[in-house]
Image (cartoon, coloured by chain):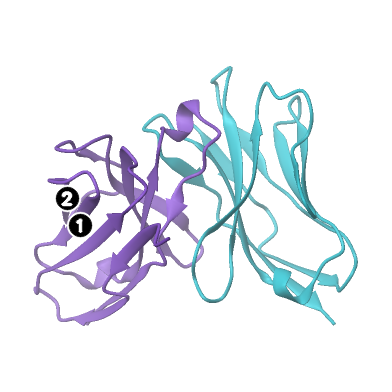
Chain colours: A cyan, B purple
Amino acid sequence: AQKITQTQPGMFVQEKEAVTLDCTYDTSDPSYGLFWYKQPSSGEMIFLIYQGSYDQQNATEGRYSLNFQKARKSANLVISASQLGDSAMYFCAMAGSQGNLIFGKGTKLSVKP
Amino acid sequence: NAGVTQTPKFRVLKTGQSMTLLCAQDMNHEYMYWYRQDPGMGLRLIHYSVGEGTTAKGEVPDGYNVSRLKKQNFLLGLESAAPSQTSVYFCASSYRTAYYSNQPQHFGDGTRLSIL
């Protein structure tokens, strides 16, 4: 069965600095996809970035990049030049066999001015 | 450009009462999902649907029922609410299943439900 582990319940980062949010996964499927979502205090779930297991390059979307290390089964989210608006919960997820997303427990990021 | 709309946004129920949460999407998506989010637990799948007229159980289906009579709507019902069902409920939809696609699921803004 698929499993997502996020070991950092909370993280602090200084404004304008980069931060890495950890995510490890477990799956026996040869092909899989990994997603990151942001949940601000207002509660909505915002899709950030996707990485396919066979993608040749690490995914990037603006200030977000994914440090994908297949052998280590890790898919860490890197946020560059942190902004106050980046303060939120961040969830790593992967596709489950029912077509759903299997989520980790999340990391709460706080950006300090 | 509504996307996924959930109603109501907030609700307080007494134990034993029933209610229905409505999810509507205007993106012509085949796949729809109901998740619940509890503190420290992330989101967990309750039920899902792969198309109009179909439903299936997810990870935590007990105490809930669903219906997908129309492609754009996915209803989540609580027949006899219990305090353990106090949670935030999210509906999501996608064009293709996440298992074979890089297309993300689109989420509604959530329904905060309290059972007293």
Q: Is residue B59 visible?
A: no
Q: Residues within 10 Å of mark 2 (few under 14, many from 20)?
A: many
Q: Is residue B63 above or below residue B115?
A: above
Q: Which residue is the extreme one toward the front?
A: B1
Q: How many marks?
A: 2
Tell whether label 1 touches label 2 (CB within 8 Å): yes
Quarter in which the C terminus of chain B is drawn = bottom left
Q: Is residue A29 left or right of residue A25?
A: left
Q: Which mark is residue B76?
A: 1
Chain that bears disc 1: B
Residue drawn at the location 62% of the way across and 36% of the way down:
A25
Residue drawn at the location 87% of the way across and 73% of the way down:
A14
The image position of residue B5, as x and y in percent, is: 33, 63
Q: Which mark is residue B66?
A: 2
Q: Is residue B114 visible?
A: yes
Residue drawn at the location 32% of the way across and 75% of the way down:
B9
